[in-house]
Image (tube, grey):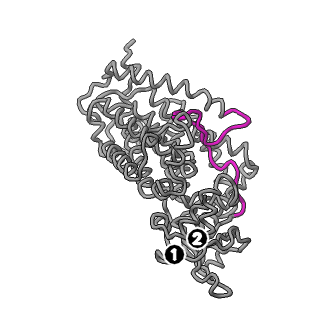
Amino acid sequence: MDWAAWFGTDEYDVAREVLLRGFAALAIVALASALAQFPALLGEHGLEPVPRFVARTSWRRAPSVFRWRYTDRLFRGYAWVGVALAGSVVVGLAQAGPWWVVTVVFLLLWVLYLSIVNVGQTFYSFGWESLLCEALFLLAFLGSTRVAVPVVILGLSRWLLFRLEFGAGLIKLRGDRAWRDLTAMYYHQETQPLPGPLSWWAHHLPSWWHRLEVVGNHVAQLGAPVLLAAPQPVASVGAGVMVLTQLWLVLTGNFSWLNWAAIVLALGVVSDGVWARVLPWVPDDDAVAVGSRPPDVVPVAFAVVVGLAAVLLLVKSRRPLLNLFSRHQLMNASFDRYRLVNAYGAFGSVTKDRFEVVVEGTRELGEVREPRWAAYEFRGKPGDVRRRPPQVAPYHLRLDWLMWFLALRGYRDPWSGSWFDVFLLRLLEADRPTLALLRRDPFHGERPVAVRAVLYRYRYTSREERRRTGAFWTREELTVLEPPLTLAEARRSAV
């Protein structure tokens, strides 16, 4: 038996490029988000400072290059190096070299992003962070265009896609009854963390369509993943179903790069032959696709490295596999500190009411009996009822997402209370990096005398209300979460 032919394949050259370039592009998005937001949220003067976190935790809990030294300047330097490395893959430079160039580039990206996530605390507690870490490590072993595509790495990429989709499907069936009685989408478009420009219209589609959406979700997340183990073109059909459902989520919401990561993984299932049938300009000829490379080129060193990586990932897959079929399935969980093989899932429960925390400030406290309060506007989350929800994904607005959880879980929940106290302090200080995270500062860089937080219930306007008022939302004030807070009081609270 020809071991090289067994080890590698020449049927997935397009898939390899899709996987490598796709996740390199997502790494650039993630690093761009970090460059713009990390120092204000987690930097030396951030809401959850990295130096403070590192001082009270161990390497064993959260390995990171920033444990040796952290400064905002050093962080930006590392992030820009990551952008350059990922960019070399997007333009195809890394793939043109020896097989080990791709391995080195992706492992460096994995180390860098893992280092960011492991000190990111609350602001990096989302499933797509672990997903990106896992994918960067796995794809490091796909090799360059000079070698055949390793079959085992393609299989592990399908295993990742299976866990991502099937885990999300199971968590829904085991969770909220609304997924079982097909009513979940009656509420989702209105109550999701960051609605998009089309979410209002999607919410007002007929009830039968919303029930069909839930059925389609179950088919895509519980049925289509099973097809990934089938021969071509059946596996590509299953991947196509997942791509279509993920595109609908892209159009109607803002879930960072989660949907795009699923799309890239699904497109990585499609063989060159299927690509050639679907897109006639894609050649079904490896000599054309990869130049003069013989289809069975597998350097011994490459085979050894890939084999060791595959064994490691297969061993690490035991707990995620057991978790899929556990009655107490964990959602978005990492089973090791290096985030190599993780558990995924989303929206195991559906929120039926939308609550929003509106942060306001005033410069008149004590000067008048009824001070005028002006709202700080966030970039993505609902605030001004007349503002159309923006499209921000695959970019991730971390502060906006945590504001959704803040309203959902309660201000004094331990998960959110500490960073929000510091956030209010930074507003009172008119801290420029913090204000740069917002869409609108009503005081134009000047310090307010006091700030407060008010809890509202939001709902979409009806079609008639929208025609009459031009608003996308209507809201009802429920309570004042944080009474008027002055700078001196905030400094005491944030200690």
Q: Quadrant of residue 483?
A: bottom right
> Disc 1 residue type?
Arg
Q: Nearer the viewer, residue 411 or 367?
A: 367
Identify which residue is drawn at 67% across, 64% down. Answer: 206
Examine the structure image and report whether residue 449 is included in the region drawn in magenta.
no
SS label for mark 1: loop
Question: Label 2: which residue?
Answer: 487
In this rendering, would 107 be left or right of 45?
A: left
Identify which residue is drawn at 65% across, 34% down. Answer: 324
Q: Earlier in the sequence, mark 2 or mark 1?
A: 1
- The magenta stretch is 324-353
The answer to whether residue 208 shows anywhere in this view is: no
Question: How far across and how far down the image is residue 384, in percent?
Answer: 58, 74
> Disc 2 residue type?
Leu
Distance CA(mark 2)–CA(mark 1) = 9 Å
Is the residue 447 above or below the residue 51 in the image? below
Identify which residue is drawn at 33% across, 18% down. Answer: 300
Residue contact at pointers 2 and 1, CB within 8 angstroms: yes
Q: Nearer the viewer, residue 318 or 294?
A: 318
